[in-house]
Image: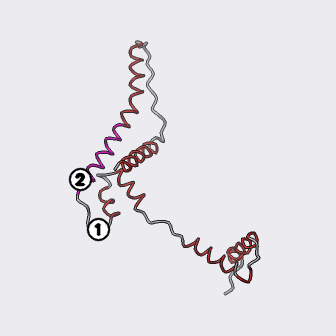
Amino acid sequence: MEMLMRELLRSSREEENHDLHEPPARKPRRDQASSSLDSIFDEIADEQAPVSKQSRDQVGSTAQLETYLGETTISREDKPLQYWAVNKVRFPTLAKMASRYLSAPCSSVDSERLFSSVSHIVNDNRNRITADHAEMILFIKKNLPLILPKST
């Protein structure tokens, strides 16, 4: 649970950083002289604004997590990504985390094909071939068909 909370807070901070593409708004210039008390108050208010936003994000993320954990679980036949598509308005931070962690894993098919090709090059008959030469042969084997015209 604690690890999930840390991830939620990190996600909300990343989201906050993505929303800050615009420069901060300029303060209006005052023509009349203001008291030093007003300027001190303005400084304190400016320093406190980011802290209150961060604490609001923490409270919002905590509330999302507690609400989600209080709900009944979906059946095994339901699709989790479909659930998060429907509930992304209710749980925006959790929905982003779900899309990140529930997405399809990366495929290792290309790397397996490459190892298979290497096994055809380095075999019992070519047991003294150096790694550099095997790499050159593999490079030619994979890239030569790309530059040669296909004969039909």
Query: Mark 2, residues whose alpha carbon is within 10 Å: few (<14), some, or many (≥20)?
Result: few
Residue 78, by quadrant, is: bottom left
Residue at the outermost bottom position? 152
Residue closer to the observer: 30 or 70: 70
Residue type pointed to by label 2: Gly
Q: Residue at x 73, y 70 (%)?
A: 131
Task: Residue 55: give x, y in percent of width and height.
Answer: 35, 37
Q: Pointer 2: what residue?
A: 70
Inspect the image, locate mark 1, and give the three-letter code of the amino acid beneath it. Asp
- Residue at x 73%, y 73% (from the top left corner): 134
The label number, if any, that marks residue 78 in the structure image? 1
> As drawn, is 126 to the left or to the right of 33?
right
Q: How is the image coloured?
A: secondary structure
In the image, taking residue 69 as reference, residue 9 lies left or right, namely right
Say if 80 sits above or below 3 in the image. below
Q: Position of residue 119 (x, y in %)?
A: 65, 78
Q: Secondary structure at mark 2?
A: helix
Q: CA distance from mark 2 to mark 1?
A: 18 Å
Q: Are marks 2 and 1 in contact (CB under 8 Å)?
A: no
61 part of magenta stretch: yes
Q: Quadrant of residue 42?
A: top left
Magenta-colored span: 55-71
26 or 86, nearer to the observer: 86
